[in-house]
Image: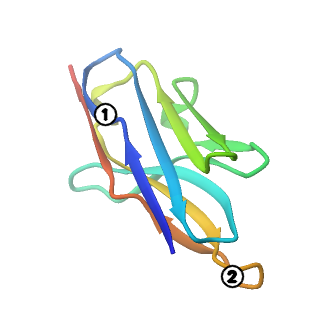
Amino acid sequence: QVQLVDSGGGLVQAGGSLRLSCAASGRFFSINDMGWYRQAPGKQRELVAGITTGGSTNYVDSVKGRFTISRDNTKNTVYLQMNSLKPEDTAVYYCHAEAKLYSWSSRNWYWGQGTQVSVSS
């Protein structure tokens, strides 16, 4: 199985920065695409940023130019650097990863437990 542990959330004033981290551990063949989703109260979970094994990235329009996703494949870890935070960025942030438990198995999705990001105005 794959365990994802995400961390780095907190309370910050508007304009501030936070860096989220998510490390994958357990027994698996490979970690593939990784990324971050967020869910604000009363809203659906949305993709914030994703990154492939090769480093290709994609972002939701609302965070482009402010957030940067990166990963360290040697540590099976994904990061989200969040700058110029706005109150509307307030949400629980969840990391996710696609992983194969065996070379012959299909990819499955796994989720972190979530970390709260709160931005005050």
Residue sitting at the far top: 15
> Is 24 displayed left or right of 28 in the figure?
left
Q: Residues within 10 Å of mark 2 (few under 14, many from 20)?
A: few
The amino acid type, in three-letter code, at marker 1 is Glu
Element carrying mark 2: loop
The residue under the point 56% across, 44% down is 78
Mark nearer the viewer, 1 or 2: 2
Q: Toward the viewer: 15 or 62?
A: 15
Name the residue tied to disc 1. 88
Name the residue tied to disc 2. 106
Q: Is residue 92 above or below residue 105?
A: above
Residue sitting at the far front: 27
Who comes first in sequence, dot 1 or dot 2? Answer: 1
Estimate the x, y position of residue 110 in percent, counting from the top left.
Answer: 49, 67
Residue sitting at the far bottom: 104
Estimate the x, y position of residue 11 in percent, counting from the top left.
Answer: 22, 28
Estimate the x, y position of residue 65 in percent, counting from the top left.
Answer: 57, 24
Q: Is residue 105 above or below residue 13?
A: below
The amino acid type, in three-letter code, at marker 2 is Ser
The residue under the point 79% across, 47% down is 54
Estimate the x, y position of residue 81 in percent, counting from the top left.
Answer: 50, 29
Image quarter of the C terminus: top left
> Mark 1 to mark 2: distance in Å?
36 Å
Would you say residue 20 is visible in this rendering?
A: yes
The residue under the point 77% across, 85% down is 104
Q: Toward the viewer: 30 or 69?
A: 30
